[in-house]
Image: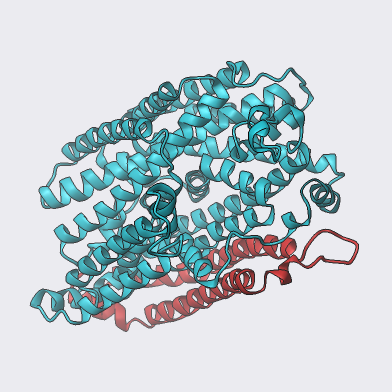
Amino acid sequence: MNKELVDKIKANPDYQRLVKTRSGFAIKLTITMLVVYFAFILTIAFNPALLGAPLSPDSVTTVGIPVGMAIIVFAFILTGIYTKRANSEFDDLTNKIKKSVKEN
Amino acid sequence: MNNMNRIFLFLILGSIAVLASGTIDGEIVKQALNVPAIVMFVIFVGATLGITYWAAKRTKSAKDFYTAGGGITGFQNGMAIAGDYMSAASFLGISGLVYAKGYDGLIYSIGFLVGWPIILFMIAEPLRNLGKYTFADVASYRLKQAPIRILAASGSIATVILYLIAQMVGSGKLIQLLFGLQYEVAVVLVGVLMILYVTFGGMLATTWVQIIKAFLLLSGATFMALAVMAHYDFSFGSLFAQAVEMKGLAVMSPGGLVSDPISAISLAIALMFGTAGLPHILMRFFTVGDAKEARKSVFYATGFIGYFYILTFIIGFGAIVMVFKNPQYLDLAKEAVSGGSPILGGNNMAAIHLSHAVGGDFFLGFISAVAFATILAVVSGLTLAGASAISHDLYASVIKKGKADGMAEMRVSKIATVILGIIAIIMGIMFEKQNIAFVVGLAFAIAASANFPILFLSMYWKNLTTRGAVIGGSIGLATAVALVILGPIVWVQILGNAEAIFPYKYPALFSVTAAFIGIWFFSITDKSHDAEAEREAFEAQYIRSQTGIGAEGASEH
């Protein structure tokens, strides 16, 4: 990729939009995942009794079981959300950028 | 297409075998020759050798060998990634951990899973857009080839060999127990089959072996979980109530796996960043056609892996209620000495015994064969990644300075495969009686502290220079290795010292931090002319990483 092409793509509003929206989106999702996971792991380190509490007085199932399962499902849903948006909106933008590069 | 049909026929037959096995009841045969297991294993080996033959005819170029021609779909690759990740160690180890400690097993699996979304958001696309065969392609994209490739290849080869040792020793013991074969015979068998798959079939055979195994493992685990749940009318409440009756309330809450915040965070960092630095996993992203398929791969892989961890949790609890204190699976000799109702073969055999409890001899045979297949598939993927580091990074890029002929490069990787296979066999036999508990932890620590920081910063940080990457990456690598040696597992348990010099089991928090600080410091203080050029080259690289303009496509044939 030569300097001229680099400058041209950098000036392309679609490229600027792609980079801005996608990195913003990816960072938001990454932080969400990290916050959820570290909240879980630090609860275990500092206050394990919270997750060991029974769901109801007459049940042996603890709060930790649905919470743990929910984190697994949540991680999967996050990948789904990102993939769906990236495969439509971000790929459309990318294709527009590629087309404009080819035209010139 | 004909070959595809054959594969699917095999998969269908596999799933019929799973369904049919529920009705069969049989005598318990233990540690003697396990006939159904051997028959099913022979079928698996026959089918995979058939695939290897088919793949060998399609593996003509270096690109075919390393990336299966780049034409694997997102779904297939997701299944293969999940297969790489669902090793026998994680199937037997995590279900065994749940069996022994209950809830703690779930904490472990969650740690292994949460790296995947991060890989998708941060790594998958730039990796696919910038790389060709190995992750060192990306790390060295705008930096000096030789030093970066040597460092990345060292990190890859170290990770691969450590992982291989763990897999080989595990496989030898498992096969000894399940099939009644001698330890050395089992290790040699695994080594030889793996060499055959990889040298002849390359990535195409390795991928399909992995896909089939992932399918069989998921089917088998699903059947076991369903059988356990059916026993309790699909009520988790009654399953847990029964488990608590057997083992006490402690199985339902966090126990001693992570006790202090430093260990907790350090383990989390090792699992998350380690996953994003495993060479055999990263290599899979080059087998798909473009960034779109790369994303889909992670989406499917996360789904399969998450589902698998939920299954292993149910299987672990199933083993608590059906295997624990069951006289059939009790190790009487051991109990006479230590008490506490130990099961035959140790806690890691919980899932295997459960397969017998819910499906009789036939299903035990099926799960045993699947466990063996799992080991084979995982060592193949590992060896291919190690061989690529040798042939593509060291031979073609460093020794031949990028001017190697594709055929010669492929020949070198085949030779490297054979050598790695022989090393794996020798190490497997050497380490038979050693305590290898630290090995996988060390592999993850190296991946997280050496491979990941260089890869990540090369993608996102403009000011990264060759000097920073080499010095910082080496600091990460050295810190990880040193802290593991000085830590409680090696220093106390293996070397027999009274107290650990480094008090934590997991060094990642410290070694990853050291790597990032080292890379940062030695990059920003790098005022050389080359460093300036490397910074200037970032923009073009960033555009390619974001848009895929100029990226490697799928091969034409």
Is residue B434 rendered to the left or right of residue A58?
A: left
Rendered view: B187 above or below B34: below
Q: Is residue B419 visible?
A: yes
Residue plotted at (58% across, 43% down): B91
| Quadrant of the image occupied by residue B451 | bottom left
Color encoding of the figure: by chain
Rendered view: B363 above or below B259: above
Residue plotted at (30% across, 44% down): B386
Where does residue B516 sit, x and y in percent of width and height? Answer: 32, 73
Q: What tint does the image give chain A?
A: red
Is residue B145 rendered to the left or right of residue A93?
A: left
In the picture, which quadrant includes the C terminus of chain A?
bottom left
Where does residue B333 sit, x and y in percent of width and height? Answer: 64, 27
Is residue B221 rendered to the left or right of residue B521?
A: right
**Chain letter, colour cyan:** B
Residue plotted at (43% across, 43% down): B436
Rendered view: A27 above or below B272: below
The front one of B218 and A67 is A67
Where does residue B457 sit, x and y in percent of width and height? Answer: 32, 71
The front one of B6 and B442 is B442
The front one of A94 and B373 is B373
Where does residue B241 sit, x and y in percent of width and height? Answer: 84, 51
